[in-house]
Amino acid sequence: MNSLTPLATCLSAALNGVLPVPTQSVVPGLAVGGVLAGDVVLPHDMPPVSEALRAGVAVAALDLVGASPGAPVPLSDPVAVVPGAALPPGTDAVLPEDGIERWGAMAEAMRPLSSGDGARRAGHDGRAGAVLVQAETRLTARHAFAARQAGVQNVTIRRPRVAVQLDDPTQADFVAAWLADLGAELGTERPDLTLRRTPNHAPRLALGPAETAWLARDAAGLVLDLPARFDGMVAALYALALPALARLSGASPRADGRPLARKVTSTVGLSELVLLQAEGDAWLPQPAGLVTLSALATAHAFAILPPESEGCAAGTPLAATPLDQPLG
């Protein structure tokens, strides 16, 4: 075990001095999956003017004080509106059709309204300058929709370029989908990170079950050697590729802290990946250093036990990284 390089040492040597990739300014729809390099802010009040929430007639609420079937209030030049329409100046509410009595070209209000009834005031959804999405957040489809709806033309993201050089098509497809979900761009031209099958099958990294994995830098960028077996490949992706992508994206891995539902043991001197399944408010751990297909399919998060750990007792709080959307 002493001949193996600690995980922290490997990561430090590979990532020391590595800076986030340059930013890109793109329309929100094309930025989904990327990590924001700057806050997304509202360019103006939303909505910019008061608008209708229902169909009816735009009115000034004060004009309808005391309106009733016995004492209707005439509506002069009523303006019909539909949901989303801007309210005309001087109006602040929408009177629905069931509150209106029509007599040919004449219309009367049969009931009063409060200011804002059936309407959304200017700035209700947010004020100009308010932060919609914070920097270092992974942009999702809902974030992009909110930005477009608010009139944001472009957002600034970081999108690392990653080359995948794996012979196994099943593993290559998984890795490509995993990278795309993290906002990375697949490409072989000047990649920031290259994922390849390891040329060295001798154990060299104190990481279970990925002892043959290795992360290093060369003249072109970061290179991650992935073990041939799927369990080692998965462990290397979470323990090595994810920190590398976080550094390149300028993001931070998310953390979800819960107590352990049962104890987990670990080998001293070895960092070990633990897959975790959410069970109520606790983590149900799989054996440390073991990745099975069934555990991978049902797990919700992972943690890496440090080499000085002998394990954790039941009830011990454990900070874990979600398997889905682990960044931002």
Image (spheres, rainbow, N blue to C red):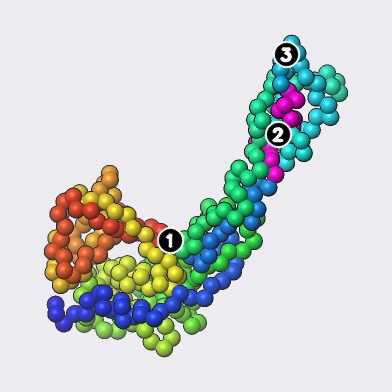
Q: Nearer the viewer, mark 3 or mark 2?
A: 2
> What is the residue that sits farthest to the bottom in this orientation?
219
Location of residue 116 by image quarter: top right
Is residue 229 a member of the stretch shown in magenta? Answer: no
Describe residue 212's horizontal placement relative to residue 220 as left or right: left
118 up-or-down from 66: above or below: below
Q: Label 3's element?
A: loop
Type of amino acid under label 2? Asp
Q: Tell me where residue 101 appears, x and y as whole percent.
A: 77, 19
> What is the residue that sits farthest to the right in this orientation?
105
Residue ID for mark 1: 328
Location of residue 75 by image quarter: top right
- Quadrant of the rendering where the C terminus is positioned: bottom left
Point out the stretch of residues depicted in magenta. 49-64
Of mark 1 and mark 3, the one earlier in the sequence is 3
Q: Residues within 10 Å of mark 1 (few under 14, many from 20)?
A: many
Q: Label 2's element?
A: loop
Residue ID for mark 2: 92
Tag shown at residue 69: 3
Tell me the residue at 53%/61% (across/down). 39
Q: Tell me where residue 320 appears, x and y as whole percent.
A: 29, 58
Tell me the residue at 70%/19% (across/down). 111
Type of amino acid under label 3? Pro
